[in-house]
Image (cartoon, rainbow, N blue to C red):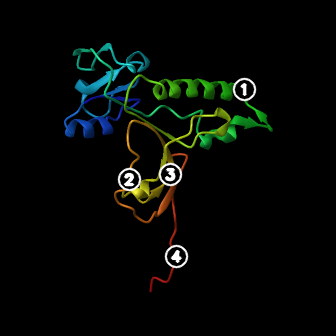
Amino acid sequence: MKILVACEESQAVTKELRVLGHEAYSCDIEPCSGGHPEWHIRQDVLPLINGWCHFCTCDGKFTILGSAWDMIIAFPPCTYLSNAGARHLYKGGKLNQERYLKGLKGKEFFMMFYNADCTKIAIENPIISSVFEMPKHTQEIQPYQFGHPFTKKTRLWLKGLPALRPTNIVEPINIIIWGMPVVKVVTGDTA
């Protein structure tokens, strides 16, 4: 399958898809840190999301995509949408108009993926502030359902794809708040 992994500079997902035999490309305005410039498109992703496009990877290879993508996996920025930033949305008991407008721009960007001309779409984001009236998510997942002992509720919006099934449920030992781990202290007699 030809797969666009949008807003991914790390190439973590792209590399795994390539191992599985897919023709996957990461796309971000940032340079790739995953070590595979031949699979990274450094540009605005919007001209690419509906396929029928052309692009250059960071190694200079020119590619023409003469169809829609078979799948899009997107990680759009959540800076102004996330519930974690909601405390900045209301200052002094009233709506921070500047931040709200940035959130609406973030929603517009998110919706470009949600409405893309592709039969298989997965979009990942944390819990988004209800003021932005986003479409209903398909699924909520936690890292501890996949072998990582952390809690950080993440939402998925899926189109043409099955929901993820937990693969290795473990006991969470700490939580993540605004991207920073907070260790859960376990006390008891150590003698």
C-alpha span from label 2 to label 4: 33 Å
> Separation of disc 2 and disc 1 at Cα?
39 Å
Residue plotted at (44% across, 24% down): 116
Give the mark, 2 or 1, whose residue is nearer the N terminus: 1
Instruction: Single out the residue that lies furthest toward the right.
Output: 93
Marking on residue 97: 1
Check disc 3 and report the residue beneath it.
Answer: 152
Q: Is residue 96 left or right of residue 54?
A: right
Mark sitting on residue 156: none
Compared across the picture, whether 190 is left or right of 96 comes to left
Query: Hey, what amino acid is under mark 1?
Result: Gln
- Mark 3 or mark 1: whose residue is earlier in sequence: 1
Q: Earlier in the sequence, mark 2 or mark 4?
A: 2
**Residue type at mark 3?**
Lys
- Extreme residue in the bottom direction: 191
Q: Camera-side residue: 29 or 140? A: 140
Secondary element under disc 1, as helix, strand or loop, is: helix
Read off the residue under disc 2: 165
